[in-house]
Image (cartoon, rainbow, N blue to C red):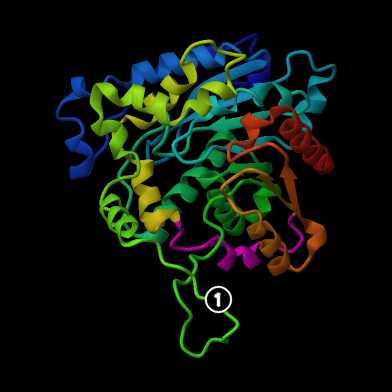
Amino acid sequence: MDPTASTGPMLNDCETELETKRSWSSSLWSWWPSWRPTSMSLLKTAESKILTCIQNDLWARFVTLPNQDRIWTLSLTNKLAPKPADQASKTPLVMVHGFGGGVGLWIRNLDALSRSRTVHAFDLLGFGRSSRPPFPSDAAKAEEQFVDSIEQWRQSVGVENMILLGHSLGGYLATSYAIQHPSRVAHLILVDPWGFPERPQSQTQEGQSEEVVKRVRPPRWVRAIASIVSLFNPLAVVRAAGPWGPGLVNRFRPDFKRKFEDLFDDDTMTQYIYHCNAQSPSGEVGFRAMSETLGWAKRPMLQRVHLLPSSMPVTMVYGALSWVDSSSGDRAAEIRGNKAHTKVRLIDDASHNVYADQPDEFNKMVENICKSVD
């Protein structure tokens, strides 16, 4: 189906959740469905309310991969474009969300960024409304499963070349994808990417220069709690909270409600976040496999960023108030050598969710990057 033929938001009705093989830990959460006030149907309802804000032509559907996994996908075009053919000829923008997110979080960006070119956004495998298959416990294999699903998605949608944008975990996976499939990426945009720096050493190693500063170890109680938490999936507490889960999300992530309060005067966004993450764990199992205690990546991307073609343009966008250290972007530029092809940008008064904190400035920056491509 051609997305330009759509005359308004259209949702695919064929949305029965696929049954997949699940690990013991995943099936454990299915023992008592009533304990968790969630379902894929409730996630669909919350997302549908968010998508009613979209003004441009929207084609929302599941894209089925060769292995029968399904990727929930949005494709947007500008129904008011003076020359639709020109828009169709431009390199599409593909947006990849971060950990625990979904396509609904791009609601402040989708219309603005699809004014002059097609925009695709999808739920990563194991997140949102996409299929939730088992993930391996090996970091490299888990990463490969994510990246393979992105490439299979690209082939299924028929995108030959793209401007690839990834936020947080999505930035890490987008970089891995660009390393493995460089001919498909016209420009790589990394927004507050997770997993780039190496985990700091707790103390100087034998033979190192005395100039290296010894780092202070966290208190014993912090390390003890971190060790216990590491035994569980990152979002297990949301599911374990049962009927108190939605309130827990509201309490600990009130910022999501504030970021979108001019669009929704209720808890639509926090409900969406809750339903995205209260389902049986899948993508977060893959994330856990790729991460160490306290969220460091087992396979830091700075160790591989040199594998990106030197001619590939890369723009790294950070929130000035984010917990993600923008110095990783500067280090990536140094490693790549050709600083003309690696830009690091800061957006003031923005935290980790840059796209929602300062959407106008973010959209303008991304649109200018896209214009530099075609």
Horizontal and vertical percent position of residue 199: 48, 65
The residue lying toward the viewer, choosing from 371 and 351, is: 351
Vertical position of residue 252 compared to residue 228: above or below: above
Reading the image, the residue beneath label 1 is: 213
Residue 22's image quarter? top left
Query: Which residue of the protein is positioned furthest toward the left in this rendering?
Result: 31
Horizontal and vertical percent position of residue 157: 57, 34
Asked whether 1 falls inside the magenta stretch, the response is no
Horizontal and vertical percent position of residue 260: 58, 20
Query: Going 31% across and 62% down the picture, which residue do you hit?
Result: 220
Report crowding for label 1: few under 14, some 14 to 19, many 20 or more residues within 10 A (C-alpha): few
Residue 36 seen in the figure: no
Query: Which residue of the protein is positioned furthest toward the bottom in this rendering?
Result: 207
Residue 54's image quarter? top right
Query: Going 79% across and 20% down the picture, which residue do you hit?
Result: 84
Q: Main secondary structure of the magenta part?
A: loop
The residue lying toward the viewer, choosing from 342 and 2, is: 342
Tell me if 300 is positioned left or right of 178 in this view.
Answer: left
In the image, what residue type sits under mark 1? Val
Q: Give the range drawn in magenta.
A: 296-312
Query: Going 18% across and 44% down the picture, which residue do you hit?
Result: 24
Query: Going 38% across and 42% down the picture, which residue do you hit?
Result: 283
Residue 285 seen in the figure: yes
Horizontal and vertical percent position of residue 44: 42, 18
Asked whether 310 falls inside the magenta stretch, the response is yes
Assign the C terminus to one quadrant of the image.
Answer: top right
Tell me if 287 is positioned left or right of 309 in this view.
Answer: left
* Residue at disc 1, secondary structure: loop
The residue lying toward the viewer, choosing from 298 and 10, is: 298
Vertical position of residue 286 compared to residue 96: above or below: below
Vertical position of residue 99 compared to residue 176: above or below: above
Assign the N terminus to one quadrant of the image.
Answer: top right
